[in-house]
Image (cartoon, grey):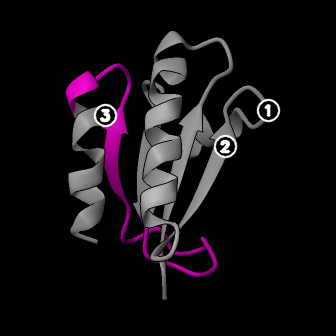
């Protein structure tokens, strides 16, 4: 089973715009081993409460095929942590 990585963002978020090319590069590097998803909190705001998202961009990993069991969720990046952006590849390498 492949791990899933989900990025939550908002269209007008400046940090999301900075993070976008980094995330695209990560997708390209890990697409054979990890499934990637992107969710706009502008279009699906209810996810903010489900995952208790306090800042965007937020990146989470999941170990599930059906997204019904959220027991193995890990948050990798949140908000405007530019150091977190740089460490994303290292975090994903360990999955």
The dot on residue 56 is none
For marks 2 and 3, the one nearer the N-term is 2
Task: Tell whether position 71 is magenta.
Answer: yes
Inter-mark Cα distance, 2 to 1: 8 Å
Compared with 90, 44 (above or below) is above
Q: On the image, numbered disc 2 is attached to which residue?
A: 39
* Residue holding disc 3: 85
**Of the two numbered discs 2 and 3 in the rendering, the one whose residue sits closer to the viewer:** 3
How crowded pointer 1 is (Cα within 10 Å; few <14, some 14-19, many 20+) is rated as few
On the image, the x and y values in percent for residue 37 come to 62, 55
**Regarding mark 2 in the picture, which secondary structure is present there?**
strand
* In the image: residue 86, left or right of residue 49: left
Q: Is residue 14 above or below residue 58?
A: above
At a point 48% along the width and 81% down the height, the residue shown is: 2
Say if mark 2 contacts mark 1, CB within 8 Å.
yes
Chain part drawn in magenta: 62-83
Side of 11 where 53 appears, left or right: left
Q: CA distance from mark 2 to mark 3?
A: 18 Å
Q: Compare residues 25 and 78 and report the one nearer the observer.
A: 25
Looking at the picture, does residue 66 appear above or below residue 29?
Answer: below
Residue 35, horizontal then vertical, whole percent: 56, 68
Q: Provide the residue designation for mark 1.
A: 43
């Amino acid at each position: 089973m492949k791990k899933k990585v989900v990025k939550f963002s908002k269209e007008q978020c400046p940090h999301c715009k900075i993070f976008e090319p980094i995330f695209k590069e990560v997708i390209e590097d890990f697409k054979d081993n990890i499934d990637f998803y992107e969710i706009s909190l502008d279009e699906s705001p209810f996810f903010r409460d489900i995952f208790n998202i306090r800042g965007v961009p937020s990146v989470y990993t999941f170990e599930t095929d059906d997204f019904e069991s959220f027991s193995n969720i890990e948050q990798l990046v949140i908000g405007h942590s530019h150091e977190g952006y740089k460490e994303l590849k290292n975090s994903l390498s360990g999955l």
